């Protein structure tokens, strides 16, 4: 469709950067206002309201994405989420590692991107380590580990998505969206918060349709993409150090938009404030979590946004497995940390309350 616009000096790839920038601006602004974060939805102190925000976004993303598929605008038949040979070991181990890492860093990558733009130096440190480790896992010294784990596969045949199961895409989309909506509406969130969460979800099909239909060019095709943070982080890292040799892509525009949108929201609403590490031990914990997320995000095929918010609406079995593994990893790590805090508290007679954790 892109060639019908008649642009002579702009390629589809260049236009995708502009699209990603606009989508990122919207995500960054809305995510800062709603505190959108999968970690908070799983193990946060306010998990019920946080889960309500996340599930509202997921419900809208599900409905919008599958509506676009049914109308013929996009197709996921050749997408990496629909591989017949499911790299089950890589996805499960990667998801567990990512989930554990986001508990150690007190935020998923999308949330840390928003916090980094709001003055949180802990988040910026985590993002830099995450990007380096993810790139090393994708194309560097850790790539052999990735390929070895990816070789352990399970054949799914034609059942690569829920759409291949009895009932088809319509039934499964309806069931998942209805369950997500029911939880969101009972989460106790204000209407304005749920509306903003719905707008976050709407960005997912907007990106799918934008890259897979509006900007599709027969002569210079671009990848079908939506919101994600693992691949964009590695792409942005590489572009930052070699921008004179390569052109920016969708991921660079997306991250730039997220940082700009979150910064605007933080400045407008007075939530911008500088924050940093309080001790070497805390620094080590956050860096360890960043490394786990870097490896895990690549192995699992995405983060809580790439494989979760954008991946689950494709009805992909791989994406659903990745998100479930991330959730389990977060619960296990949170249980381990809680046990350590309780043990430290009981062994120190002079300590009456557990140590305060840094703000998210």
Image: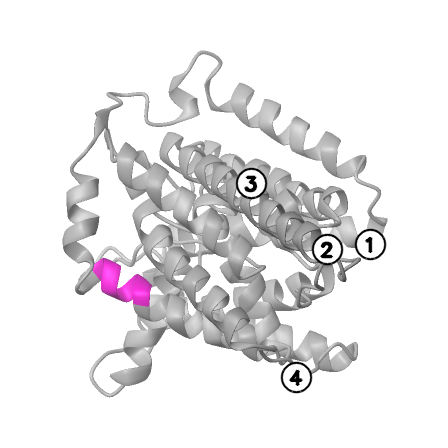
User: Residue 90 appears at what percent x and percent y?
Assistant: 28, 41
> What predominant SS class does the magenta segment belong to?
helix
- Which residue is the site of mark 4? 274
Q: Residues within 10 Å of mark 4 (few under 14, many from 20)?
A: few
- Which residue is the site of mark 3? 331
Depth-wise, is mark 3 or mark 2 nearer the camera?
3
Q: Does label 1 or label 4 sit earlier along the sequence?
A: 1
Label 4 – label 2 distance at C-alpha: 26 Å
- Choose between 310 and 110: the one closer to the eye: 110
Which quadrant holds residue 345? bottom right
For the point 63% across and 78% down, the residue is: 263
| SS class, disc 2 | helix
Depth-wise, is mark 1 or mark 3 nearer the camera?
3
User: Residue 85 appears at what percent x and percent y?
Assistant: 21, 30
The magenta span reads 133-138
Q: Residues within 10 Å of mark 3 (few under 14, many from 20)?
A: some
Q: Does label 1 or label 3 sit earlier along the sequence?
A: 1
Q: CB under 8 Å between callouts 1 and 4?
A: no
| SS class, disc 4 | loop
- Which residue is the site of mark 2? 196
Label 1 – label 4 distance at C-alpha: 28 Å
Q: Residues within 10 Å of mark 1 (few under 14, many from 20)?
A: few
Quadrant (top left, top right, bottom left, bottom right) of the C terminus: bottom right
Q: CB under 8 Å between callouts 4 and 2?
A: no
């Amino acid at each position: 469709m892109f060639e019908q616009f008649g642009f002579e000096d702009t390629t589809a790839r260049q236009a995708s950067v502009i699209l990603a920038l606009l989508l990122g601006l919207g995500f960054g602004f809305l995510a800062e206002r709603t505190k959108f974060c999968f970690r908070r939805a799983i193990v946060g102190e306010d998990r019920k309201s946080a889960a309500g925000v996340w599930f509202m976004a997921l419900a809208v993303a599900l409905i919008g994405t599958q509506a676009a598929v049914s109308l013929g605008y996009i197709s996921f038949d050749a997408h990496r989420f629909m591989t017949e040979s499911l790299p089950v070991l890589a996805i499960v181990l990667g998801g567990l590692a990512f989930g554990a890492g986001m508990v150690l860093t007190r935020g998923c990558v999308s949330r840390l991107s928003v916090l980094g733009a709001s003055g949180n130096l802990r988040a910026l440190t985590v993002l830099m380590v995450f990007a380096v480790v993810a790139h090393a896992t994708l194309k560097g010294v850790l790539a052999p580990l990735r390929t070895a784990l990816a070789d352990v596969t399970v054949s799914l045949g034609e059942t690569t998505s829920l759409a291949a199961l009895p009932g088809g895409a319509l039934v499964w989309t309806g069931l998942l969206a209805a369950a997500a909506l029911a939880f969101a509406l009972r989460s106790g969130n204000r209407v304005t918060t749920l509306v903003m969460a719905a707008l976050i979800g709407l960005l997912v099909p907007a990106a799918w349709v934008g890259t897979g239909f509006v900007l599709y060019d027969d002569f210079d095709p671009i990848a079908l993409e939506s919101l994600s943070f693992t691949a964009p982080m590695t792409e942005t890292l590489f572009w930052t150090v070699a921008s004179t040799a390569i052109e920016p892509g969708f991921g660079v525009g997306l991250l730039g938009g997220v940082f700009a949108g979150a910064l605007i929201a933080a400045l407008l609403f007075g939530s911008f404030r500088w924050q940093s590490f309080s001790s070497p031990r805390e620094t080590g914990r956050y860096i360890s979590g960043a490394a786990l997320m870097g490896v895990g995000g690549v192995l699992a095929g995405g983060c809580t946004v790439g494989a979760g918010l954008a991946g689950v609406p494709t009805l992909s079995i791989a994406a659903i497995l990745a998100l479930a593994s991330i959730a389990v990893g977060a619960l296990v790590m949170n249980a381990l940390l809680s046990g350590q805090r309780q043990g430290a508290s009981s062994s120190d007679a002079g300590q009456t309350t557990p140590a305060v954790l840094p703000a998210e």
